Amino acid sequence: MRREVPVFLAGAVGVLMIIEYFFNVPLMRSWSTEIQNWAVIISAFALGLGAVGLARNHVARISQKKPDSINSVLLIVTLVVTIVSGIASRTNPTFLFIFNNVITPLGSAFYAMVAFFVASSAYRAFRARSLEAVMFLVAGTIVMLGRAPVGEIIWKQFPVITEWIMKYPNLAGMRGFQIGVAVGVIGVGLRVLLGIDRSYLGGEA
Amino acid sequence: MVTGRVTSFVILVVIFAAIIYNMQRAKTRLPQMRRIAGLDAIEEAVGRATEMGRPVFFTPGMGDITTSTASETFAALEMMSYTAQLTARNDTGLIVGVAIANVYPLSEQVVEQAYLQAGRPDAYHDDMVRFLSPTQFAYASACMGIIEREKVASTIMAGRFLAEAMLLAEVSSQVGAISIAGTGSEYQLPFFIAACDYTLLGEELLAAGAYLARDPVRLGSLAGQDWSKLLALVMVLIGAIMVTFNPKPPLLDLLKK
């Protein structure tokens, strides 16, 4: 029963969502809306559970005096301050200060770092050790030059070739990939609906 | 029926029929399955971690189970279960970093059950599955911190990833970890291909559960998916030929219904 009930619920809700998507049945629509509202509420509780798990792990690290436990202290303090100030009011000055001066700039800084990581990764990937790597290198170089203003100054045809690469070989590859993923998603969905894929309950790989 | 969804419904029914037929067929005749290097490499990754005495880091990405990324997340959970069983048998450390709150209890359950199934419930501990943050770059920095501090020997990234994909893959490479990644996002896949040792291309990730379980019925569903892709290919060819000769073929209006 411990496994059958979740499998039945997953299947039933999945079938209901499919019917609601394709057919105009008012009763199904209202059930679907209700279930989606439940999902939001369950997600909120899951977030609470996650926060408790996070706090539990880091409190354990502090009490065990593990190396770098200062990071855990910082995490617990900022977690408590952010939660308390955020629950008090969304316009609480402390909460706004944390959001505008800590979370947002840190997020932007991290995003900016992606460029440097792309550069080091491209250096390794573009080493022409095989035919695929050579093709990767040539296509990548042409597209980079075609997208940058300096490329057009070097040779007027770079943007034209870039456009062709993006519009035909690249798009064809992307479409093939998308079709494969779409069919795969339907396959996984059907296996979950039929209760064949149950490893989300644990224990069956 | 909802206008504009008739064709999608018919195609969905055809794909469902192809998959179900092949699942039944596989009970008597097992379909041929090509090797998927990325999935075979999981054993190598765990073996390497065992030899080095370092942990394996697994993350199921930023996909949820209540959105369109659910299938990728379920596939990631299948891989997580398999990885956890291997780490349990080999007595190797495992750290699972979770970003999405809904996935956290599922991950805990999956890892705990895998250790139980491997006969090592004593080796499972609460610190293995860690909820990090649902905020993208907070999650990325937490993963990067774990990979750096714990000096992991292997990193497995499976599921839906966004811009953090590059950061995780590159940090894994910098600490010398063997990295296996799989995603259904066509925008992040090139980053994984460039930075990781093994990459699972979209549908390979979604086939993970069936491939790793070696269960005939599930393998049959993959054969059904192949039939569906063949159907898609035929439709693309017919469409291309028709549009070449007539830019507005009458069939186009029918497909829009």
Image (tube, rainbow, N blue to C red):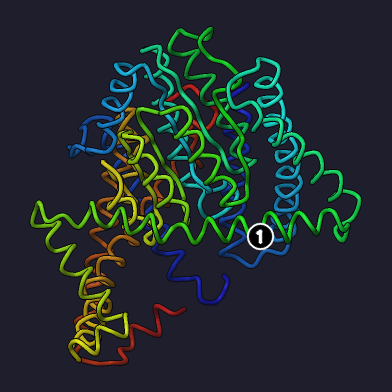
Q: Mark yes or no: residue A37 visible.
A: yes
Extreme residue in the right direction: A88
On screen, residue B136 versus residue B153, left or right, reads: right
**In the rendered image, the vertical position of residue B221 relative to residue B111, given as above or below:** below
Frontmost residue, B224 versus B28: B224
Q: What residue is pinned by disc 1?
A: A104
Q: How far across and how far down the image is residue A99, in percent?
A: 74, 57
- Residue type indicated by callout 1: Thr
Q: Residue at 58%, 32% (x, y): give it.
A: B106
Chain that bears disc 1: A
Q: Secondary structure at mark 1?
A: helix
Q: Residue at 27%, 74% (x, y): give it.
A: A144
The quadrant where residue A29 appears: bottom right
Q: Mark yes or no: residue B20 visible.
A: no
Q: Dot 1: within a 10 Å radius of its alpha carbon, few (fewer than 14), some, or many (20 or more) residues?
A: few
**In the rendered image, the vertical position of residue B233 relative to residue B201, given as above or below:** below
Frontmost residue, A90 versus B90: A90
Q: Residue at 69%, 29% (x, y): give it.
A: A53
Frontmost residue, A202 versus B194: B194
Q: How far across and how far down the image is residue A82, in percent?
A: 79, 46
The number of callouts visible is 1
Q: How far across and how far down the image is residue B66, in percent?
A: 60, 49
The quadrant where residue A47 appears: top right
**In the rendered image, the vertical position of residue A56 relative to residue A145, given as above or below:** above
On screen, residue B65 versus residue A101, left or right, reads: left
Frontmost residue, B206 versus A2: B206
Q: How far across and how far down the image is residue B37, in percent?
A: 22, 38
Q: Residue at 73%, 61% (x, y): give it.
A: A100
